[in-house]
Image (tube, rainbow, N blue to C red):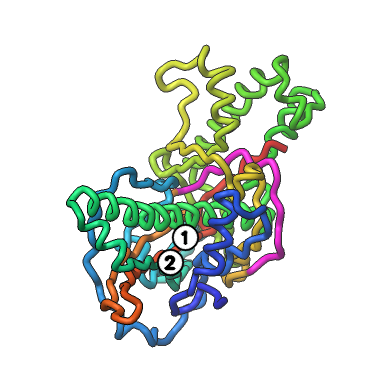
Amino acid sequence: MANVNELNFNQLATILNQIVSQATGVATITPTNTAEFVSVGQTALKVGTDPLFATISQVLGRTFFANRPYSRKFRGLEATQQRWGHITRKISIADNNFEDSAAFDLTDGQSVDMYAVKKSKLLQENFYGENMFSDHITIPSVQLETAFQSPEQFQQMLDLMTTNMQDRMEQAAENFARATIANKIGAIVTVDNANQVVNLLTEYNAETGQTLTAQTVRLPANWPNFVRWTYARIAAISARLTERTSLYHTNVTGRTVQRHTPYEDQRLYLFSDDRYNFEATVLADTFHDNYLKLAYTETVNFWQDIQTPRQVQVTPGYLAADGTVGTGEAVTVNNVMGIIADRDAMGIVDFGRRMYATPFNARGEYYNLWYHQNIRSYSSDTENAVLLLLA
């Protein structure tokens, strides 16, 4: 499978089937090469023309009235085509150093050069590529004959088939977003920036002088105090992200960018077991308006595989210090509690779904309905992101 960080359309079906199988519990977790579909910001500008561009057209989608449509999770990752669509160029500026004032260092007979050149240090990241996948259903004439016996039967058949297809496409997009977060987790661990990885239990033990483990910390005598400390720690991280600093993201050599993430631009994804335990054991007794209130928070039931919900196994794509896209070795990350990130640090862009019907097959007495979807997953490692581990 081709790397997505090119000017092309990436065929996604094989790896998407692997991701969905892990998410639905059909297959056990294995290292997933998320680098194959996540567009990572890079500084090298690609040139060329997409050979498929001339054949692409915008097609209006169809609306189906279904009985129980599935609504995908990770809505906080969604971005618009206007902001992150097509070939995206993101330009940042690195700070220059301050200078001494010349006003108090004047010399007779000499002038002060007020036209000295001081070039801005610009960093350009480029995001390429889309991923596409398809699916189809076959409708034999026998089913049509049965369905058309009454309007009610036709509606039941239509609801059954279209709802199932829409649910599958919706779940595919959801797990595409899930894999985007998993890639970011793997990228943070691979880059190994100490400021971006917070080992909560290690810090808590160091601060309190205890020697708790991931198991003993959950004992009734230990858990409430740890939860209060953890919420305070996450709140402190959230507050620090609002400061203009270079600590919580990747910096390209010679282009150190200062970032700040206001509260409204922060996205916190928190493991469901931990969040519900927090609320049940502590927050139910201490919650008040705006107390222990964090940034935009979304609950994650599992990070990659529903059977091993706390674990991530990926071969991540990430931005290397030289500005190129690196593909790391397969990494396994255990005890993932959450990740807090800038809204521009990662996301998905849905380029739309289309449905087409084939002509009726006279010999086989059927026709097919084909569904297509184009989607982009992006990761901007120069934006703030902090990984929270129960380790």
Contact between labelled residues 2 and 1, with CB atoms less than 8 Å apart = yes
Whether residue 248 is situated above or below residue 96 in the rendered picture = above
Q: Residues within 10 Å of mark 2 (few under 14, many from 20)?
A: few
Res 232 label? none
Magenta stretch, main secondary structure, is strand
Above/below status of 65 relative to 86: above
Instruction: Give the total of numbered labels.
Output: 2
Q: Residue 100, can we see it?
A: no
Q: What x and y, as percent, mark residue 286?
A: 51, 14
Instruction: Report the residue marked by disc 2.
Output: 112
Is 329 colored magenta in this rendering? Answer: yes
Could you tell me residue 176's position as x and y percent?
48, 57
In this rendering, the label closer to the viewer, 1 or 2: 2
Q: Residue at x 55, y 75 (%)?
A: 3
* 268 left or right of 362 in image: right
Q: Secondary structure at mark 1?
A: loop
Q: Which residues are magenta?
A: 327-342
Q: Earlier in the sequence, mark 1 or mark 2?
A: 1
Under circle 2, the secondary element is: loop
Tell me which amino acid carries mark 1. Leu
**In the image, what residue occupies the spot 32% across and 56% down?**
162
Q: For residue 186: magenta?
A: no
Viewport quadrant of the C terminus: top right
Query: Where's residue 154, x and y in %?
Result: 23, 54
Q: Quadrant of the N terminus?
A: bottom right
Q: Is residue 358 above or below residue 209?
A: below
Q: Which mark is residue 106?
A: 1
